């Protein structure tokens, strides 16, 4: 997390302090005074084109407000927080970072507010500010702080909102909608004149708009003051009032209200002798774009090699996905080794590349987002003579080259295989310094290059994965970037789809994907476990295992017997999701397949990223075991049932409890949403099924008829019927509108634990303590098939989304996949060490999630691939 005050300090160091004569006009502006003094005006939006001084205006406003706040006066009751977005800096260009920075400043200024942060960590688990779902936790923390009654007024500034490239829309929505009910909170935001922002902001009546273009005369005066201040420090103008007056007037006429233009011209004048000043000022063009074009022309006039080197530097920095350190830039740009491997030489080339770039702490940044935009778009023919794709291909090949050159086993000399990542200290020099960027972004550049020859069986990618894969995984662990590696391999898998001549590479990429998913936890916690448990506990035919068998520890005398393939009988366990503190009773995929929800005896519901396995949220609120969880069909809500006799409905984005439904007289065993999300059905130990209005929480109907506990309820796809399974050994099918029960299905020899409709509603499947699954005709009630094969109680049954298969989970610790038409057992999936309590298909039928109970098996479960094997993987 970056302290926004440090960012402001850096801005002052690179651009100079905010000049009062350049910003004081806004303090007297009618719109600013209305914002400051009128409780109905919560947001002031400052709009202007690039380089018009918006950032320095906000710096000036901050300097003006600061003395009246706790930042300067500990006795004050007013707080001030701010954030400067920068598109070229990943840590400053996303909505999460903005809220994190704002919260940090508020808490740091008033430490008593830390209690709200601690409360949220306690409620939602350990902080995961990098995860997608962390947005909900951040919003809730922020709102908790705003509600603090001890606060008199809060000023919040967000600069360059247009440079918040990730999550800009949700940040705007939060500012304008979520904080609207707090009149003591005053926002100032600045951005370019973007239509999408204009539309959202103009629609709000509490928004005051201040457009710099409409205040051109005032801005012109501010520019004049800025020019006067900057040129007064030029050595070439000292003791020459006439020349200084000439420069002042010329720059004023050409600046066109653009502070950045003035800054770049004055920067050039710093190296000009007094007798050349007039010539330079006369030659300098008006406007930013023309000034940038002049800088490009300057590079074109350099000696051939210098021109080539500058072009390589500018193209690489323009296409890079984050700011590069000097040696990283050298590694990916294609510069000769004598330059690329020497930080001083790299800095020399950067300085030759016009005034587009600046170097701070050995990292290269653009002087302004407009400079990067210009190089990418308007200077493309000069900077990318062979096109953007060719430049991406160069960065890809250079990345792979530096990885092949750098990666090896035990790069940080950890020694012991079990050394935790927390004890890993980079040696000096750090071998990963030049490879950090390449480790994470090589596939991104491959993708943008559009080069299909690199994804063939005889390609450099194939060779890299076969010879460096395990060392790369170790490096990802050392860089705390294993999740990035998983996403990278997924992206590589997508690129391979439909490619001819790449069958071997496809198999290898799929094997790498399974290897990293299966061993992720071990490798993340101890980097060298990639060579130990990773190789020992992979199947015999794993390509990674075979290729790196020589790296396996020699001191393992007896290796455990492993199956031949990842998908033992075609069911590959991709990952075990760990985090619950007690038995897991229920698991379910969201309908967009992006998340998994689990309910546990630890009284919590956990939401997981289905692709990476990351824990996204922990929902707390139940007072007893959580027995059932289900997503609404739009994935915006989760319903949970508990032994505390309540059903709770949760907002999956923010993690808040929307409704608590109370009317059952005993423990809840099962909950389900209707297809349209308007209703929830629940089953209970009180022998009833209840139907609820999901929006109001009102109980609409109670269905009575079972003689024992209701263990499972499910809606038909069209919402017209409800099926319920009970320990009275029957399945009942109810009319969801009238509550009538036209039929009870009898045939099981013991208690019924689970029921499910087929997708077309024509059949019902049920699982029972009698170790069988039965498939019934939902219209006639006839038993169509009895599926036998489990050695213990069947706890959970589910149809695949296409209705062709049934999956069942049992106390015999297995999941079985059955052909719904023939009743044949297609697969038996093993992997749990205790009872399987819940199974569910993903909605694209590619995965099954399973939950487990039992001491020592408190993980969520395993995610298994479906048939055929090549349909899985990335």
Image: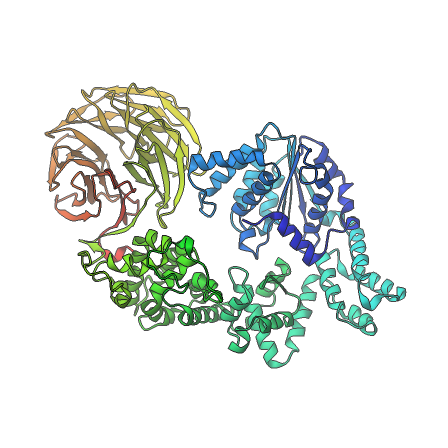
**Quadrant of residue 184 within the rendered picture:** top right
Which residue shows up at 60% across the image and 38% down it? 203
> Looking at this rendering, what residue extends furthest in the bottom direction?
304
Q: Is residue 236 left or right of residue 798?
A: right
Q: Is residue 690 left or right of residue 404?
A: left
Q: Position of residue 228 (x, y in %)?
A: 82, 58
The mark total stands at 0
Q: Position of residue 27 (x, y in %)?
A: 76, 42
Q: How is the image coloured?
A: rainbow
Compared with residue 387, is residue 152 higher up or lower down, i.e. above or below?
A: above
Front residue (pair 288, 727): 727
Q: Position of residue 193 (x, y in %)?
A: 64, 49
Q: Position of residue 755 (x, y in %)?
A: 21, 33
Q: Is residue 372 left or right of residue 473?
A: right
Which residue shows up at 12% across the image and 29% down it? 750
Compared with residue 604, is residue 437 higher up or lower down, i.e. above or below?
A: below
Front residue (pair 285, 792): 792
Residue 320 seen from this side: yes
Which residue shows up at 76% across the image and 68% down it? 269
């Amino acid at each position: 997390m970056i302290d926004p005050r440090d960012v402001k300090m850096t801005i002052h160091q690179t651009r100079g302090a905010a000049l009062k004569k350049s910003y004081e006009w806004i303090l007297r502006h009618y719109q600013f005074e209305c914002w400051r003094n009128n409780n109905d005006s919560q947001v002031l939006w400052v709009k202007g084109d690039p380089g018009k001084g918006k950032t320095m205006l906000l710096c000036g406003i901050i300097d003006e407000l600061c003395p009246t706040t706790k930042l300067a006066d500990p006795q004050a009751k007013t707080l001030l927080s701010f954030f400067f977005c920068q598109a070229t800096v990943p840590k400053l260009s996303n909505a999460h970072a903005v809220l994190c920075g704002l919260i940090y400043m508020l808490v740091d200024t008033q430490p008593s507010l830390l209690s709200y942060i601690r409360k949220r960590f306690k409620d939602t688990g350990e902080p995961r500010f990098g995860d997608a779902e962390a947005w909900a936790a951040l919003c809730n923390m922020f709102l908790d702080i705003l509600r603090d009654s001890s606060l008199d007024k809060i000023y919040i500034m967000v600069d360059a909102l247009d440079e918040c490239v990730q999550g800009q829309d949700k940040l705007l929505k939060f500012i304008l909608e979520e904080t609207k009910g707090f009149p003591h909170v005053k926002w100032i935001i600045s951005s370019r004149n973007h239509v999408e922002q204009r539309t959202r902001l103009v629609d709000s009546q509490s928004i005051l708009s201040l457009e710099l273009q409409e205040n051109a005369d005032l801005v012109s005066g501010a520019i004049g003051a800025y020019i006067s201040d900057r040129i007064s420090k030029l050595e070439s103008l000292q003791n020459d009032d006439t020349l200084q007056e000439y420069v002042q007037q010329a720059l004023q006429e050409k600046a066109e209200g653009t502070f950045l233009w003035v800054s770049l011209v004055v920067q050039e004048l710093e190296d000009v002798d007094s007798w050349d000043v007039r010539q330079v000022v006369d030659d300098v063009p008006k406007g930013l774009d023309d000034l940038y074009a002049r800088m490009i022309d300057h590079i074109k006039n350099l000696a051939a090699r210098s021109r080539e080197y500058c072009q390589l530097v500018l193209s690489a920095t323009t296409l890079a996905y984050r700011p590069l350190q000097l040696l990283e830039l050298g590694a990916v740009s294609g510069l000769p080794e004598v330059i690329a491997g020497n930080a001083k030489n790299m800095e020399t080339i950067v300085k030759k590349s016009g005034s587009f770039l600046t170097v701070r702490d050995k990292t290269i940044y653009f002087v302004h987002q407009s400079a990067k935009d210009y190089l990418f778009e308007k200077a493309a023919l000069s900077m990318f003579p062979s096109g953007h794709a060719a430049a991406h291909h160069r960065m890809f090949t250079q990345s792979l080259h530096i990885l092949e050159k750098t990666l090896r086993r035990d790069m940080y000399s950890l020694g012991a295989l079990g050394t935790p990542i927390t004890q890993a200290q980079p040696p000096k020099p750090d071998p990963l310094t030049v490879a950090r960027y390449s480790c994470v972004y090589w596939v991104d550049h491959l993708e943008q290059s559009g080069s299909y020859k690199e994804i063939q069986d005889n390609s450099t990618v194939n060779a890299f994965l076969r010879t460096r894969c395990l060392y790369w995984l170790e490096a990802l662990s050392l860089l705390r970037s294993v999740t990035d590696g998983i996403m990278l391999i997924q992206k590589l898998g997508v690129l391979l789809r439909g490619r001819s001549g790449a069958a071997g590479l496809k198999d290898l990429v799929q094997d790498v994907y399974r290897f990293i998913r299966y061993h992720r936890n071990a490798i993340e916690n101890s980097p060298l476990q990639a060579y130990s448990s990773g190789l020992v506990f992979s199947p015999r035919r794993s390509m990674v295992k075979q290729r790196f068998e020589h790296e396996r520890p020699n001191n393992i005398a007896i290796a455990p017997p492993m199956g031949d393939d990842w998908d033992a009988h075609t069911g590959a366990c991709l990952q075990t999701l760990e985090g619950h503190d007690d038995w897991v009773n229920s698991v379910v995929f969201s309908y967009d397949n992006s998340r998994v929800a689990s309910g546990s005896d630890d009284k919590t519901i956990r939401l997981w990223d289905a692709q990476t396995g990351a824990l996204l949220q922990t929902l707390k609120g139940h007072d007893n075991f959580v027995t059932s969880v289900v997503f609404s069909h739009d994935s915006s809500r989760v319903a949970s049932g508990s032994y505390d006799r309540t059903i709770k409905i949760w907002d999956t984005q923010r993690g808040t409890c929307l409704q608590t439904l109370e009317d059952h007289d005993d423990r809840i065993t099962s909950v389900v949403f209707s297809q349209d999300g308007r209703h929830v059905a629940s089953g209970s130990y009180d022998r009833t099924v209840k139907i609820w209005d999901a929006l109001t929480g009102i109980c609409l109907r109670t269905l009575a008829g079972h003689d024992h506990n209701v263990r499972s309820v499910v809606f038909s796809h069209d919402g017209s019927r409800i099926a319920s399974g009970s320990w009275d050994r029957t399945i009942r099918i109810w009319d969801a509108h009238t509550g009538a029960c036209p039929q009870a299905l009898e045939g099981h020899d013991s208690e019924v634990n689970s029921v499910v409709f087929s997708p077309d509603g024509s059949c019902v499947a049920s699982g029972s303590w009698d170790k069988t699954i039965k498939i019934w005709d939902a219209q006639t009630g006839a038993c169509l098939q009895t599926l036998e094969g489990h050695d213990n109680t069947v706890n959970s049954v589910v149809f695949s989304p296409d209705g062709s298969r049934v999956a069942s989970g049992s106390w015999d610790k297995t999941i079985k996949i059955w052909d719904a038409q023939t009743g044949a057992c297609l697969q038996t999936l093993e992997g749990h060490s205790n009872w399987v309590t819940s199974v569910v298909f993903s909605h694209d039928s590619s995965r099954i999630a399973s939950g487990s109970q039992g001491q020592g098996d408190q993980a969520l479960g395993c995610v298994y691939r479906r048939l055929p094997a090549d349909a899985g993987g990335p």
